[in-house]
Image (tube, helix red, strand yellow):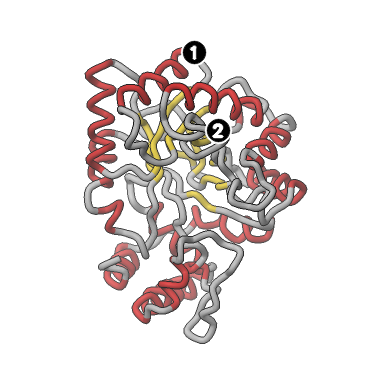
Amino acid sequence: MEYKTLGRTGLKVSRLCLGTMTFGWSADEAVSHAIMDAAFAAGINFLDTADIYSRWVPGNPGGVSEEIIGRWLKTKPRHQVIIATKVRGRMWDGPTGEGLSRHHIMQAVEDSLRRLQTDYIDLYQTHWPDDDTPLEETLSALDTLVRAGKVRYIGASNYPAWLLTKALWVSDVHRLARYDCLQPHYSMFNRAEFERELAALCRDQGIGVIPYSPLAAGFLTGKYTRENRQPDSTRTDGGLIQRLVSDDKAFVVLDEARRIADAHGVPMAHVALAWQLAQDVITSPIIGARTVSQLQELVGAVDLKLSAEEIAALNRVSEGY
């Protein structure tokens, strides 16, 4: 497994990050532990979760993914695992049960630390913006956590370029901890959101980038074809798959990815991940798995090096997304 420094921090993280949204949802605890064991054995030292995973499942109160990770983490050397989690979503009833206020963050981080059974979080991320809370309040609260040693670095997810820029300015002016990592939605089928402005900003400011859904909710694994367009009902993809299976251009992208995969004798997913890993601004795409076999099919992507011609071909067919 290759490793890369996360932005301007000192964290050395694996070039693939294991996403854990499936834990306690479509993967039970035993399977989740087996997936993490296989990932750790393959050299993946970077796990991404969130406090709300998977609160949308009936009977799931949220925090279940963190709890599963916490019990697994007790079996591994803590300093060898980089844990990233997030705060923002609703975790309890009442007006303070969600958001990025100091009140919510201070309670939410204690809850995450308890569930993860650790005394620090390597990367604490604001899951998405909170228009009702000033950036100064959010960043001041996060700075307090960094100074207390409960959080080592902070990051943002789903932030547009203008807001991330403003947040960096607020941190600079008030001498607060700054966002050193961005988690954007990025794949061949969602390029403009990141590439238009965020990519240049992250490169200029030395911000690590850990994209989520790099396989477009599984569309880039090759499971969908012109003949098989039935969406996977177990995924929460916001209707992405439904849109893609109805888009003839999307299958042109798949054709090119499949051609390159066949030429290298690798799974199609390797091509999609290698396309991202070839970009200097990308640190670690986040991969998800519901089984050990799914994980094992993905870990070899770091070994695939695409040619300039292959990258150009993928860029050409996916232009406009």
Quarter assignment of residue 153: top left
Quarter assignment of residue 36: top right
- Residue 46 in view in this figure: no
The residue under the point 56% across, 35% down is 93
Pair 2/1: label in front: 1
Residue assigned mark 1: 148
* Residue at the bottom extreme, as displayed: 227
Does residue 213 sit above or below 220 in this rendering? above
Left or right: 312, with 43 as reference point: left
Please state which of residues 221 and 125 is positioned toward the viewer in this rendering: 125
Residue 138's disc number: none
Circle nearer the N terminus (2, 1)? 2
Left or right: 54, with 191 as reference point: right
The residue under the point 61% across, 20% down is 119
Residue assigned mark 2: 82
Q: Give the secondary structure at mark 1.
A: helix
The residue under the point 53% across, 35% down is 85
Q: Position of residue 10 (x, y in %)?
A: 43, 26
Does residue 244 sit above or below 153 in this rendering? below
* Residue at the top extreme, as displayed: 148
Q: Position of residue 293 (x, y in %)?
A: 68, 60
- Residue 258 in view in this figure: yes
Q: Position of residue 137 (x, y in %)?
A: 35, 22
Does residue 137 sit above or below 82 in this rendering? above
- Local packing at callout 2 (Cα closer than 10 Å; few below 14, some 14-19, many 20+) is some
